[in-house]
Amino acid sequence: MGGPFDTAVENAWCPGCGNFPILTAVKKALERTGKGKNEIVLVSGIGQAAKLPHYVDVNVFNGLHGRALPAALAIKMANPSLEVVVSSGDGDIYGEGGNHFVHNIRRNPDIAVFVHDNQVYGLTKGQPSPTSDPGWTGSLQRSGVISGPFPPLAVAIALGCGFVARALASDVDHTAELMFQAIAHKGFALVDILQPCVTFNKKNTYEWYGRMAYRVPPDYDPSDRQRAFALSLEWEERIPVGVLYRKERPSFEEVHPGVGNPPLHARETPEEAIRALIRKRVLTLP
Amino acid sequence: MGVDINIRITGGAGQGVHTSGAFVSRIAVAAGYHFHSTQDYMSRIRGGRNSCSVRIMDVPARAGRAEADILLSLDPGHLPHFLPGLHPKGLALSDSPITGDTGKVTVAPLKELALSAGSPILGNMVGMGIVAYALGISSHRMDQLLALEFRGDFLEKNRSAVRLGAEWASGRVTESFQLPPAPFRPRMILAGNEALALGAVAGGCKFAAGYPMTPGSSILLGLSTDGPPLGLVFEQAEDEIAALNMAIGASYAGARSMVATSGGGFALMVEALSLAGMLETPVVIALGMRPGPATGMPTRTGQEELEFVLSAGHGEFPRMVLAPGSVEEAYALARHAMDMAEAHQVPCILLTDQYLADTAVDVDPEDLAILPVHRRIVRGNEVPRNPEGRYLRYALTESGVSPMAVPGEPGITVVADSDEHDEDGHLTEDHGIRLRMAAKRARKEEGLAADILPPVLAGPPDGEAALIGFGSTKGVIGEAREILAREGFPVVSVHLRQVWPFPSGAVGGILSRYGTALTVENNRRGQLARLIRAETGREVAGTVSRHDGLPFTPEELAREVKERLWVARSTRP
């Protein structure tokens, strides 16, 4: 212990929760950025995963369920020099916040988004999430999940997300490496993290993920979108882990007129500029 | 009686009704007169039956009038609908073919002259030429006004259309509406929503987001047009939920922020409204009301969201609700809202409606106050720290307002959580802290109460009745008061520009002073009357309600009030 981002806040996760290795990886990745705690903002929605920001000594915006991304976008727009990182759950980002997931990938703000994907709603006690496997039995679907699973990586690639990765929570160092790359990537960067829920998901366990996951080979070319798309849909036989797709494109902040320095909190409202706006509307005759 | 000419232009969407109305407004201002214009339009892109009414007066015009003196119908098919609203001595102009009561209508060859001018779409400008002739506006002045609008070949075609219209009118159109010469005064031509956006920008708004919805969209348009030169950043959100969550995020990062919407969009924002209450992030929400429920009448007016905005949001938290009554007040209160939201760290709602949104008047630029923007963010040495050296975003203070620092400030972190939280912002389930935080938030109500804008009263102090309204009814009630005074019914008008915290003391005093108090509201159940009862424990004598989607007119309101006062007089001991 004794890392720069440790806090004394009491932890509320189950013993053995897959969130613990994710927390360790987040701190490692943030340390590697070399940024100070005042330069980083961790943003989340609601759920067990969404409590993570409280356990890291940085700026925290823990908003509403599903609404982490709009807040994160606006924080980045208001002050692009802040390192904005979202860390929240699959229900939060893919379920309640699905619309924001789609449209912020389109916008491409320079934020990193870590989704703790345990395929279950934990805090509300075991309902299926958008990524639950068909047939899986949750507390609200006793006869098994009927809907097809939401494929986050395939959706992200389809929308042109410039950094699409999958991590295995139990592999802390690799997860931290992927997180660091996601933060360093300029634009919307998604890391979907295979995270066991030790209490409510008895199918997708540490053992199961460990058996199914494999690293994409070193010679894999993440710039091949067709190949990445095919890989992103692999699930039944085995699950690829690593950077599946990568392509730089201008970030939202670079393209949006007006976003930049100085940050919005430091911008003045000169009286002369208001006067000019008023004068512009006065009808004058030649 | 001085000059008071009401000009109504009607036609389908796409026929230039709005453009013509704006043009008549400029004619009025250029001639040295005041004007008041309103829009009545249907929810469609092309066609339908739209109208724009421009009332020209030699005193500041503060309301529309039901009867038109000049009716220019760009679609003759609309005449049966609009002719009953023409003054008996009025002038109706339209092109053929005309069916029904043709005797009242002056048939003008709008299409034919438009083609002579070079384009079939210039029928409205031919009409402008006829109207200008009727008002006695010189062709030189018309050329000047057109040059402000158009350039090149299109300017020449418009000039030609206007000239052909005026030439045709000579000898055919009455000269009874001539405007006597008046000195020109430089005035702004400004609509309610434009003024609201301008006021927010003048109040230091630096972040705005929204999803288009009538009648809030034109506020977004104003913010995205006038804001950027002053450093405002605008983003169209994927939905209203995103819009308010974005504004709150930007506010957390230190930007004065706002959103604009209508009732349905505000319904989607309600959870985030509660978030602003919990995080104590300043934010301004402009809500343009229209008749509901659900989609209701999208392009028409109403005041049905008063009770909604007062109770919206789960949980208990302080808020401020302002209700501008005029174009100038839309500017002033938007500016005030930006300041108050930050001063008290609360969400502040600006309650407007389609009528005020689309009402344009001439504004004296001197009437729009330009004041310094006073930011209250703590920076550097001003940032308070606890003994461990940490900044506490939710430090317990006497006023309930905690010093607000922004993320990025060296040496500290800013923690905000939608859960109940301790002074440091981290979530807690401690019931004692819960009570202290609930009390802290509630203490802000006291500061808000000290900043209540009192109602604006006008009329004789010994009036026999009080007419009480909020928001956009201010001008109409004011003119109805003048009509009633002339007819032997001295009444005072009471305009509530702030409805929350409610000015209980002032309104209670008014109810004590005036025997008969009536609320005037564009909703069915008298929401203001109910609010007055809840906050003062007093009943008003009744409510004059109009909720068909159209604004009150002064004559109609005066007539209705007169009937009520006759009853009140006859039943008085």
Image (cartoon, grey):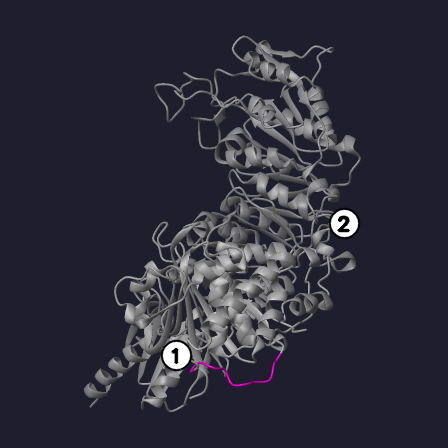
Q: Is residue A87 among the parts visible in the rendering? A: yes
Compared to B38, does B299 lie above or below?
above
Quarter of the image where the C terminus of chain B is located: bottom left
Q: Can you give x and y, in whole percent of width and height, for residue B348 in the image?
A: 53, 61
Q: Can you give x and y, in whole percent of width and height, for residue B549 in the image?
A: 35, 61
Compared to B43, does B113 lie above or below?
below
Magenta part mainly helix, strand or loop? loop
Write down the region rendered in magenta.
B176-185
Residue B192 appears left or right of A266: left
Residue that lies at the very extreme toward the right in this rendered image: A34
Bin the neighbour count of mark 2 within 10 Å (Cα to Cα): few under 14, some 14-19, many 20 and up: few
Q: Can you give x and y, in whole percent of width and height, for residue B275 in the image?
A: 52, 49
Find the distance from the CA under tag 2 to the CA under tag 1: 51 Å
Residue ID for mark 2: A261
Residue ID for mark 1: B508
As shown in the figure, which amino acid type bears the numbered disc 1?
A: Gly
Between A230 and A145, the one nearer to me in the picture: A230
Kind of element beneath mark 2:
loop
Q: Closer to the camera: disc 2 or disc 1? A: 2
Kind of element beneath mark 1:
helix
As shown in the figure, which amino acid type bears the numbered disc 2?
A: Asn
Q: Is residue B359 among the parts visible in the rendering? A: no
Q: Chain of mark 1?
A: B
Compared to B275, does A143 lie above or below?
above
Q: Chain of mark 2?
A: A
In magenta segment, residue B101: no
Between B166 and B181, the one nearer to me in the picture: B166
Residue drawn 73% across the image and 23% down it: A177
Compared to A219, does B478 lie above or below?
below
Which picture quadrant has residue B400? Answer: bottom right
Bin the neighbour count of mark 1 within 10 Å (Cα to Cα): few under 14, some 14-19, many 20 and up: some
